[in-house]
Amino acid sequence: MIDDAIREKAVQRLRRIEGQIKGIQRMVAEQRYCIDVLTQIAAAESALHRLGEFVLRNHIETCVLDAFRSGDTNERKRKIDELMEAYSRWRAR
């Protein structure tokens, strides 16, 4: 579960990313230079990646840590499996 402070930071980042995407949309509509568009796409991808890292860190510090503190071996295994699956998707990009 994302606490209020983390959630608000994530929402702020998403609003900035949304602005970047709208800017890219304008650039394409205005037929701006391809390299400039690609540069902005790379910046938006980087911002999304940093947001993903931010959310992942929160998940590890809350949900995963809680599972390990619980002493429930099945829950710990589930959280490790989740992390490995998320890592595999992350690396695939």
Image (spheres, rainbow, N blue to C red):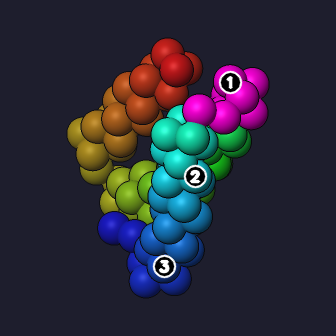
Q: Residue at x 54, y 61 (%)?
A: 19
On the image, numbered disc 2 is attached to which residue? 23
User: Which quarter of the rendered picture does the N terminus lie within?
Assistant: bottom left
- What amino acid is labelled 1 in the image? Cys
Task: Name the quadrant containing residue 36.
Answer: top right
Report if residue 57 is visible in the image.
no
- What amino acid is labelled 3 in the image? Glu
Spatial separation of the CA atoms under disc 2 and disc 3: 23 Å
Tell whether 7 sits left or right of 82: right
Spatial separation of the CA atoms under disc 3 and disc 1: 34 Å
Q: Residue at x 58, y 52 (%)?
A: 23
Q: Residue at x 66, y 34 (%)?
A: 32
Task: Name the quadrant containing residue 57.
Answer: bottom right
On the image, numbered disc 3 is attached to which residue? 8
Report if residue 87 is visible in the image.
yes
Task: Name the element at disc 2.
Answer: helix
- Residue that protrudes farthest toward the bottom in the picture: 4
Magenta residues (range): 31-38
| Within-10-Å neighbours for mark 1: few <14, some 14–19, many 20+ | few
Task: Name the element at disc 3.
Answer: helix
